[in-house]
Amino acid sequence: MLETPRDKDFSSGHSVVTLPCLELVTAMSARKDRWVSSFSFLLFWASSIPRRGSAKLLQELSPQEYFGSLQAGRASLAYFSRNASPGAQPFLEQIENSAEALQDYGISVVKVNCPKEDVSRYCGKENTLRKAYLFRGSMLIREFPTDALFDVNSVVANVLFALLFNEVKYVETLADLQNIENALKGRANMVFAYVPATGTAEHRAVMEAAFVYGTVHQFVLTTEATLLRDTGDDEPDVASARLLFCHCQRATDLAQPCRRTAMGQALTMLNIHRHLKLMGAPLVTEVAEDPEKVSTVHLQLGLPLVFILSQKETYEADRRTAEFVAWQLLGKAGVALLSRDLVDLNILLKSNVALKTPDEGVPVKYLVLEDTDEVITLVEDKSKVGQIQEEEEEEEEEEDEDEKQNNNQDIQDDQVVEAVSRDKKRELPLEQILVLTEETFHSALPEAARTVVLFYASWEAVSLAVLRSYAEVADHLKGTQGVSLAQVNCWDWPGVCTKENVTQFPTIRIYEKGERWAMYDGMWGTEELTSFIMLSRVSCPLKLATIEEAEGYLRGEFPSELSSYHHTSVLGVFSTATSEARKAFEEAGNILSGHVTMGMYFEDDALALSRKYAVSPPALLLARSGGQSVEGVALSKQSAQDMVRMIRYELLDVFPEITVQNLPRYLQLRKPFLILFSDGDIGEMESKEMLKLAKGRPRQAFVACWLNLKKTPVGRGVLKVYFATVPSPPLLLWVNLHAGGQVFQFPSEQTVTETNVLSWLERLEAGLESPSSTLSEEDWKPPLPAYDFLQMMETAVPEVLHPSHRHGDTPVPKSPGGDTTVREEPSQETKAEKGGSPGRDLRGTAPRLAAREKQGKRHSEL
């Protein structure tokens, strides 16, 4: 027999056999659960049935004999009777029936026969003969009216309630409950029970549980329905008893309430014992053996066990995921963390969750799930397991069929792959690029002021295409002081990429003296890469000491390393009274480093410089085309992020030529496009009129732009989508991609002038023009799914990283959206959940729980 938390009675050290049915439940194996549960229930039920033989446990003594037999510390329930009246007979029967149940707790039941001539305290008055008395030794603990002890449950419940006054606190208000919670935080857990009335079977079950577990948990009882509602219970059914396990031991913050886990079953002693056993089990069990051999208290009690499959590279993220799931399933299933590195499992690599049920002969099921919601549904809906497996089998069959079809294609399905495949015999000039290995990586970084490193995979088409651009960048920057270009093939040297937390390819970083690094997130063209590297050489913002330096900076002459590089310069001018704006400008410079040239002037004569350009500090001066045009803009925003957005917006051209490279920047504005498609450069008249439109109308209304079909031939494909029969250029179109997708064509018979276009736009706004076409709402996707690089490399998706970190730092994963889980959250436990919210992707789980967009298999040409 297993020991319970408490095996002592109320008689000062006498051992008793406590709740044998409960010990059987936890001792038996999962294979015998059904039989044990049935036997235990019958045994428990049978022990509560009144038996004829129980009458012998009811002692009948005289007052002298009773008071003479009282022992210190021993509890007894006494009923004083002179001549039993017919009305007292039902009560006497219940007292006799309760004798055996109370005997299990070391409480004797005595009927005291009072002589007629006895006029003592307990025998002399008629009203005292209508009460039962509870003694501990010779000390009176409680008096009970006989009508309060109406059956066995009421007798046992009320007697134990009186004796367990330290183990069971009765509360009436939410404030009382919160005071008890606060006193317990960090020390012990609390069992909070609501019963509609005392003396019921549920009340008795709570008291018997308190007798067993009262030294381990603090029990709190209430009969107040309003208090149950105030606790925020999800199911405030005041007609039914409720029990909540409050995890106060894990909570230390007085401002946070204890997390509560409700018991879903009826309030019986067996169910309470089962619930408390589950609450006492480890939240997450770490296992290092075959799941078929694993046994936990959850399986022994008839609940399933969920395994989160992990590996050492993603252990911390997997641990957080497992804890998040465990809190969601607390009391419904167990959760275990199984490391693939420690157990050799013959399962699919993409499997990320396993489910073991307590049913005999049922094998462990390995599944591929998308998010934590599916794990929870898996437990709550047993039919979901078979459904998921059927979907996986159907998906694999579809992917196999798709792969067969793709193998028969006459052309490559991806332009990048096609280009790499076409030019695969062409040797790249990589002499200027240093090849780094695990042995040379860390020693090579500090050798140059800035080391640019390309992390790539030699089998992956996009990496090879970027490597080609990278070689051209190296040729352009040949001989540049303080800049070194290097490469790491993560297929050959995975240890380097793992330590640097590089799990997406290609990735380019610039390391400063081997310490801080910034990640490139722009286009992969040669010009864009070169610009980023060159601009990263200069401090951002660059602090200027004199007005001469500031003027030279605006003309593009300073700093000298950028004098031959054509770019737009941003100069922030600040007075001594604008220190807060200056600090925000410096933070904005750190964010925009490598993308913008930023200078800062805050000397005493800053006011004179700003007046020259008709602005007052704080202000921005934007120098375009080598200082030929300097525009002053007041700095009304004080936060760094606001300044970043403002600077990016001000750097946009008023009437830009749309290219593949700059289109994303203008799409991010989410404005309608007034776009002129031209077969070559646009005429001088059209350019002037369109520029008037862009400047004359508030820039917030739309993006006025043009596209050269000769320089950007993809524009012809765009026009084919807009029109069944493409009209001859030039074409002026109004396109609202973000609201309805309607395309309007400016009348070809009209001349493109500011007056004509404005009149046409007014008719559009009035609904007087019909669209030439309406774009479909469906996404424009490639013909085949993208490569699943991470699955091919057998590694996890990295967490979202800040663009700048110290070399060697471990990036802190961001919360995917607020994660709160079950009802009320103590600060200690939310650490397991801040990685994410219910329904989040199971990020980090090795190799990763399946992406929401199912990835296709590896492309055949690779």
Image (cartoon, rainbow, N blue to C red):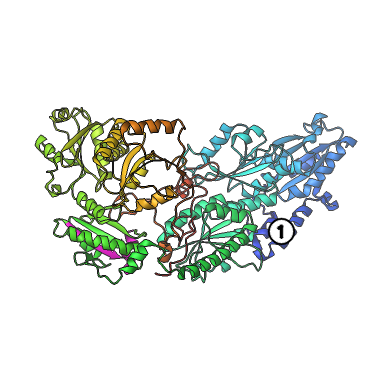
Total marks shown come to 1
Q: Would you say residue 125 is visible in this rendering?
A: no
**Which quarter of the image is occupied by the N terminus?**
bottom right
Relative placement, left or right, of 326 versus 598 is right
452 vs 404: above or below: above
- Relative to the observer, which residue lies in front, 584 or 812? 584
Q: Does 729 appear in magenta?
A: no
Position in image of residue 133 (x %, y %): 75, 37
At horizontal 21% and vertical 29% (from top left) the residue drawn is: 617
Q: Which residues are magenta?
A: 483-500
Asked where in the image residue 632 lies, by quadrant, the reply is top left
In the picture as drawn, the residue positioned furthest to the front comes out as: 749
Name the residue type under label 1: Ser
The image shows residue 430 at horizontal and vertical percentages of: 22, 66
- For residue 233, say whether it is visible: yes
Q: Residue at x 25, y 66 (%)?
A: 436
- The C terminus sits in image quarter: bottom left
Residue at the farthest left position:
548
Residue 499 is covered by the magenta coloring: yes
Q: Position of residue 422 (x, y in %)?
A: 33, 68
Work out whether residue 409 or residue 760 is closer to the camera in this orientation and state it.
760
Question: Which element carries disc 1, helix, strand or loop?
Answer: helix
Instruction: Reply above or below: 284 against 393.
Output: above
User: How dense is the environment of label 1, judged by Cα within 10 Å: few (below 14), some, or many (20 and up)?
Assistant: some
Residue labelled with disc 1: 37
Q: Is residue 780 left or right of residue 50?
A: left
Q: Which x, y percent locates residue 294?
A: 56, 65
Q: Would you say 24 lies left or right of 468 here?
A: right
